[in-house]
Image (spheres, helix red, strand yellow):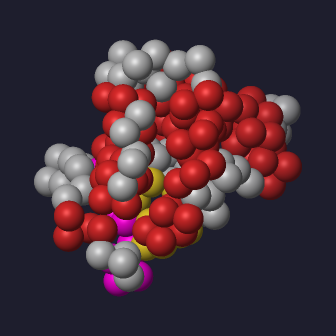
Amino acid sequence: EKYLIDRTMMRPRDLITFVNLCIEHSDSQSIINSDAIIEAERDFLHDRRKAWIAEWNQVYPNIELCLDLLYTFNDEFFLDDAKAEYARLESAILSAQVENDDLVRQFLDSSTEILRDRNIKQFLKVLYTVGVIGKWEGDKAYFANPARPTLDERDFLEAEWFVVHSLFRKS
């Protein structure tokens, strides 16, 4: 049960879709085995990723590029890990044929450490806002929600670490 819920974005429709795919992949048997769940998960993750990109593309025209860039991060990472990837992120963003949205526009100005720091934080804020990454607090990861829809400066202390939602992990 937790395995299935962890792969959704806490939306009932996602859970229903995932369970229906598990049933479909079980070949009408009365028990859903682990092979059916793994096959269903592959299809579910692929379909949800496409739907998620379509859902957010109007607000963030380059969201697919951001997601692709995130795949080079570990599933859990510190702010310093993200900062260490800055040159690669900047190069990929600036060399891609992308629409000029706010996120891309910020990467055009990275002449100082302060601006690079601002850019990486904005990149992470976007990924948090759309539900791709969460922030570890204690022993639990928190993702964007109505009470906390975005990150603020307190969330970017050097010791803070982030986690990629299981729906968007590379594995």
Residue at figure coordinates x 37%, y 66% from the top left: 135
- Residue 144 in view in this figure: yes
- Residue 13 in view in this figure: no
Residue at figure coordinates x 40%, y 46% from the top left: 110
Residue at figure coordinates x 74%, y 39% from the top left: 42
**Picture coordinates of residue 27 (x, y %)?**
84, 32
For this view, does 97 lie left or right of residue 171?
Answer: left
For this view, does 45 lie left or right of residue 93?
Answer: right
Which quadrant, please, contains the C terminus? bottom right
**Picture coordinates of residue 22 (x, y %)?**
70, 39
Which quadrant, please, contains the N terminus? bottom right
On screen, 86 above or below 15? below
**Picture coordinates of residue 20 (x, y %)?**
62, 32
Between 10 and 83, the one lying in front of the other is 83
Residue at figure coordinates x 20%, y 64% from the top left: 153
User: In terms of secondary structure, what is the magenta stretch mainly?
Assistant: strand
On screen, 166 above or below 96? below
For this view, does 11 lie left or right of residue 76?
Answer: left
Between 70 and 19, the one lying in front of the other is 70
Residue at the extreme left: 147
Give the residues drawn in magenta, as a range: 135-144
